[in-house]
Image: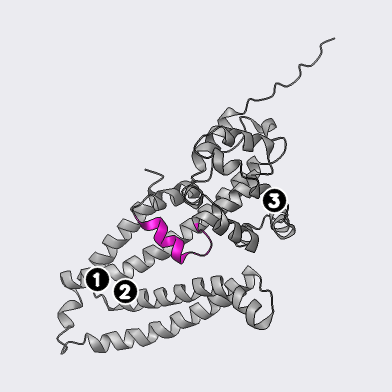
Amino acid sequence: MVEQFPVLAALLFVVIAFIYASKRSVISLLASGTSIGIGVALLLAGFQYLPGLAKTYLDIDLTWQFSLGLSACVGGLVFIVLRLILAFALKHLFNPDSPLHPLVDGTPGGFLSIFPSLVAVFLFFTCVRAAGTVQELNYVDSLAQTGIERMAGKIPPPPPSIQWRNAIESLPYLAPLLDQTDPFSRRRSRNAAALTLIARSTELRAHLFADPEIAGLIESGSWALLAGDPAVAKVISTRDRVGLVTAPAIQQAAIDFPDRADLENLVLLPDLREFTRSLVPIAEPEAESF
C-alpha cells in the first residue's frame, strides 16, 4: 500500500476535483489546469533544449541550474498571464446566456474537470519521478563506496520515493509516455548513470553480476570508461545527480548502448535490497582481559 501512495493520491485528487467541479464550477479548474500545463511544458522544454541551443548559436555552455531557473521564470510568468486571460475568457464563454453554460457544473462539469486533473497528476508524477531518481542515485553511490561491508546491518532502507517512482512506472503505457516528456528521469539515461556509479565498486558490481537478468548490462566496459570521463567524474565527485544524468557522455552512452531495451527496463531496487542483506557484519575484536 505504501508503494502505491502516489497512484492512490492521484486518484483521490481526480475524485475531489470531479466533486468540486460538479458542485461549484469547473471554470477555475480549467483555467488553472491549462495554464499549468503550458507553463510546465515551457519549463521542461527549456530545461532540455536551452543548453543545446545556447551552445549551437551562442557558443555558450549553460549549466542545468541556469537552464532550469530561466525556464521556471518563463514558465511561471506565462502561467500567471494565461491564468488571468483564461479565467476572463472562460467566464465569458460559459456565461449564463451561453449554450455551453450547462457544462459549467453538475456531471458535465465533473467530466470537464478530468482534463485539468490529469495535468496536475502529470506534474505530480514528474516530480515524484525526479525525486525517486535523485534518491536512487544517492543510494547507489552510498552502496558503491569502498568499505561498505563495514556498514553491514547498519545500512538504512532505500528511500520510499524510489518505490513510488517504480509504482508510477508500473502503470500501463505511462513510463514510455513520461520518458518522452521528462528530460531528467528518462529510464535509459538514469540507468546509465546508475551503472556508471556501480562500475566504481567491486563489491556491488560483483553482486549484481550474479543476477543473470542484468549481468549483460553490468559486464559492459562502457560504464567504467564513463566513470573515468573528466566531466562525468566531476559531477560524481560533487554529488550532482542532475548533472550526472544530463551529462552529454551519459546521454550519448544511453543512446548508443546496444541492448537499449534491457537498459530501459532495468529495475535496480530489488538487487540493491538484496545486496544490503548479503553483507555480513564484521565481528569486533574481543578485548583482552588481564
Q: Quadrant of residue 142?
A: top right
Amino acid found under the numbered disc labelled 1: Ala
Query: Which is closer to the viewer, label 3 or label 2?
Result: 3
Query: Would residue 260 be found to the left or right of residue 288 on screen?
Result: left
Above or below — where is 86 with respect to 181? below
What's the magenta region? 173-186
Is residue 31 on the magenta stretch? no
Classify the position of the N terminus by image quarter: top left
- Residue 82 showing in the rendered view: yes
Q: Find the distance from the CA under tag 2 to the CA under tag 1.
A: 8 Å
Amino acid found under the numbered disc labelled 3: Leu
Residue denoted by label 2 = 29
Query: What crowding class fits label 3: few (fewer than 14 Cα within 10 Å), some (14-19), or many (20 or more)?
Result: few
Q: Which callout, 1 or 3, points at the residue further toward the start of the chain?
A: 1
Q: Residue at x 20, y 78 (%)?
A: 104
- Residue 183's x, y, as percent? 52, 65
Q: Quadrant of residue 120?
A: bottom left
Query: Would residue 209 be found to the left or right of residue 270 on screen?
Result: right
Residue denoted by label 3 = 225
